[in-house]
Image (spheres, rainbow, N blue to C red):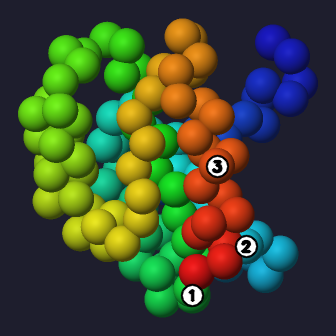
Amino acid sequence: MVEWAKRAVDLGVGEIAESLVDDPHTEAILLFMETIRGAEHLARAARGAYAAGKPMIVFVNKWDQTPKTDLARKDLERIAKGELPFLEYFPFIFGSAVEKTNIGKIFEWIPEVIAE
């Protein structure tokens, strides 16, 4: 086994987002979601980001694998915001990293959320 693999740590997106909330050099956070796992960490991160005045952009990945209807998008957003209420303060972008769908919207949102 490779030496670095013995020291590997399994961190979830919520735990990473929490550390970014505490980082004084971080101005905005991109939350790249595929599922809602570790909801308690994501909830703390979203609450912390809101309290610290750090905007968060939520990119919902794998949109290419779901029905692409407005109703499906609204349902998924409602579920995410129901599980993680503080996400209601942040913009959602639905896309696909594989198909490169809506990736550019992330960069469009960054100056806007930082300016708020």
Distance between the alpha carbons at the discs numbered 2 and 1? 10 Å
Q: Position of residue 70 (x, y in %)?
A: 17, 32
Query: Pointer 3 and pointer 1: residues touching (CB < 8 Å)?
Result: no
Residue 26 appears anywhere in the view: yes
Q: Position of residue 104 (x, y in %)?
A: 64, 34
- Left or right, 1 with respect to 82, comes to right
Quadrant where the N terminus lies? top right
Query: Pointer 2 and pointer 3: residues touching (CB < 8 Å)?
Result: no
Vertical order, 97 against 65 (above or below): below
**Marked residue nearer the N-terminal end (2 or 3):** 2
Numbered marks: total: 3
Query: Pointer 2 and pointer 1: residues touching (CB < 8 Å)?
Result: no
- Left or right, 3 with respect to 63, comes to right
Residue 11 appears anywhere in the view: no
The amino acid beneath tag 3 is Glu
Q: Position of residue 95 (x, y in %)?
A: 45, 27
Which of the 4 image quarters holds residue 40? bottom left
**Marked residue nearer the N-terminal end (3 or 1):** 1
Distance between the alpha carbons at the discs numbered 3 and 1? 22 Å
The amino acid beneath tag 2 is Glu
Quadrant where the C terminus lies? bottom right
Circle 2 Cα neighbour tier, 10 Å, few/some/many (<14 / 14–19 / ≥20): some
Q: Residue furthest right?
A: 3
Marker disc for residue 111: none
**SS for tag 3?**
helix
Q: Which residue is mark 2?
A: 27
Q: Which residue is mark 1?
A: 52
Q: Residue at x 48, y 89 (%)?
A: 51
Q: Position of residue 25 (x, y in %)?
A: 83, 75
